[in-house]
Image (spheres, rainbow, N blue to C red):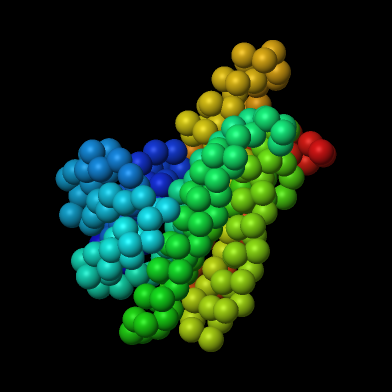
Amino acid sequence: MSGQSILITGASSGIGRACAEMFLAQGWRVGLLARRAEVLADIAAGHDGALALPADVTDPQAVEAAFDRFTEWAGRLDVLFNNAGLFGPSAPIDEVALDDWAQVLAVNLNGMFLCARAAFARMRAQTPQGGRIINNGSISAHTPRPGSVCYTTTKHAITGLTKSLSLDGRPHGIACGQIDIGNARTPIVEDLNQRARASGQPVQPTMAVEDAARSVLHMASLPLEANVQFMTVMATTMPYIGRG
């Protein structure tokens, strides 16, 4: 065991699951937080360093209980990978149902706020003080995809959250950085490419999700005196630069 601990939200699939498996392979103590308890149990099976934490990131009480359980089990919280999110509807704004808008905000913004809040409080109180929060932004934190008003709005907001946490965390030894991942082969990206095929649009290039996980591992493994403030890792030929 590395002696370090990380809690990963959205750990049941996609980037979160790839990160969980990679950190476990590196000997970290890993908290797996997501809604699907049975999937988390499968990931944790056979790993003494894994703790399944079934919870909904939009539920404040469930988030607090999960963080309490993790810190009691691991002894401290060194890193939070604040990852849980969903894309929502792909449509122009006047075709987006208000319920869909509210759901994306609840998960991508409120959920990330609640988890960052829980992590910050525990990192501030623990001895030795400090820790690291890594927020999963997105290419869409900088440049939107067409028809992504819900997702893009929340991911722009995450950049503000990252900067605020970085500033407010300085007196307490809490570092915060953001990873902006473009077109890793996850269920979200596969769904977007399926929508593209159905509408006759080009299918976008993708990269292995493990490459994104390695980038998160690099950020998490730095000493607290160093921080990756923002990292972009993406499929090399995806339409990001100049996508407009």
Q: Residue at x 40, y 68 (%)?
A: 118
Viewport quadrant of the N terminus: bottom left
Identify the residue at horizontal 42%, vertical 53% (top origin).
58
Is any atom of residue 243 visible in this view?
A: yes
Does residue 180 appear in the picture of this structure?
no
Quick check: 79 above or below 224?
A: above
Viewer-proximal residue, 130 or 56? 56
**Front position in the image: 40 or 114:** 114
Q: Position of residue 2 (x, y in %)?
A: 30, 64
Which image quarter: residue 234?
Answer: top right
The vertical placement of 27 against 171, above or below, is above
User: In terms of depth relative to the viewer, which is nearer, 23 or 15?
Assistant: 15
Left of 119 or right of it: where is 46?
A: left
Q: Tell me: residue 5, above or below residue 103.
A: below
User: Eyeballing the image, is 97 above or below 212?
Assistant: above
Q: Residue furthest front?
A: 98
Residue shown at the point (23%, 46%) measured from the top left: 44
User: Residue at coordinates 24% horizontally, 55% vertically from top-left?
Assistant: 51
Locate residue 212, reporting x and y percent.
52, 45
> 61 left or right of 87?
left
Q: Position of residue 87 (x, y in %)?
A: 56, 38
